[in-house]
Amino acid sequence: MSRIPGTEWASRSEGGHYAPHCTELTLRRRWAFGHIISRHALADLDRPTARSAFDRTPEAQGLVLARAEDEHHPSLRGLGVRMRDSDAPLRDASEAATVVRPASGT
C-alpha cells in the first residue's frame, strides 16, 4: 500500500454490520483500514493472528476500536495506539465529490 498524504491508516475492530460503518468513515473522513476484525471474532482471535493483521498494514498507526473495552483484549493490547473515529481529518467538499460510493447504497 502506498501512503496517501493526509490519510490515517489503522486496523479496526467493529460490531455487527461493520462494513457500512467503515465505508461511511472512509467516505466522510480520511481513513484507510488495512484490516477489519469483527467484534464477534475477538473471542477466538489469538495474538499471532492479530499481530500478523496489524503488521501487514505497514502504514497502520494504531487501532480504531468499536468499544473502549476492546483496548484491553489480550490479543489487541499493545499492537498500536488506540485511535478514535474522529482522529482522521474530515474530507473537504472537493474530495467528497470524487469518492466513489458503493453500488449497494451502503
Image (cartoon, grey):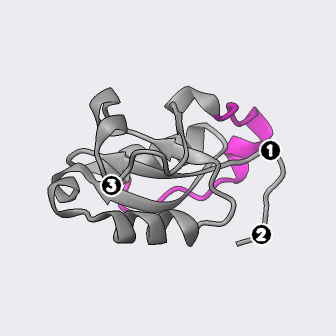
Expressed as whole percent of the image width and height from the top left, the position of residue 26 reads: 56, 47
Frontmost residue, 87 versus 89: 87
| Residue 47, picture quadrant | bottom left
* Residue 94 among magenta residues: yes
* Total numbered labels: 3
Assign a secondary structure to mark 2.
loop
Q: Comparing marks 3 and 2, which lies closer to the viewer? A: 3
Residue beneath label 1, please? 6
Dot 3 crowding, Cα within 10 Å, few <14, some 14–19, many 20+: some
Above or below for 8 versus 50: above
Residue, x 31% and y 46% (percent of image)?
14
Whole-number angstrom distance, CA of label 3 to CA of label 2: 27 Å
Residue 26 visible in rendering = yes
**Residue 50 in the figure: left or right of residue 96:** left
**Disc marking residue 57:** none
Q: What residue would you read off at disc 3?
A: 75
Gap in angstroms between the C-alphas marked 1 and 2: 12 Å
Badge 3 marks a residue whose secondary structure is loop
Q: Which residues are magenta?
A: 88-106
Is 16 within the magenta? no
Residue 78 image point, x, y percent: 48, 46
- The residue tagged 2 is 2
Q: Between label 1 and label 3, give the one nearer the viewer.
A: 3
Mark 1–mark 3 contact, CB under 8 Å?
no
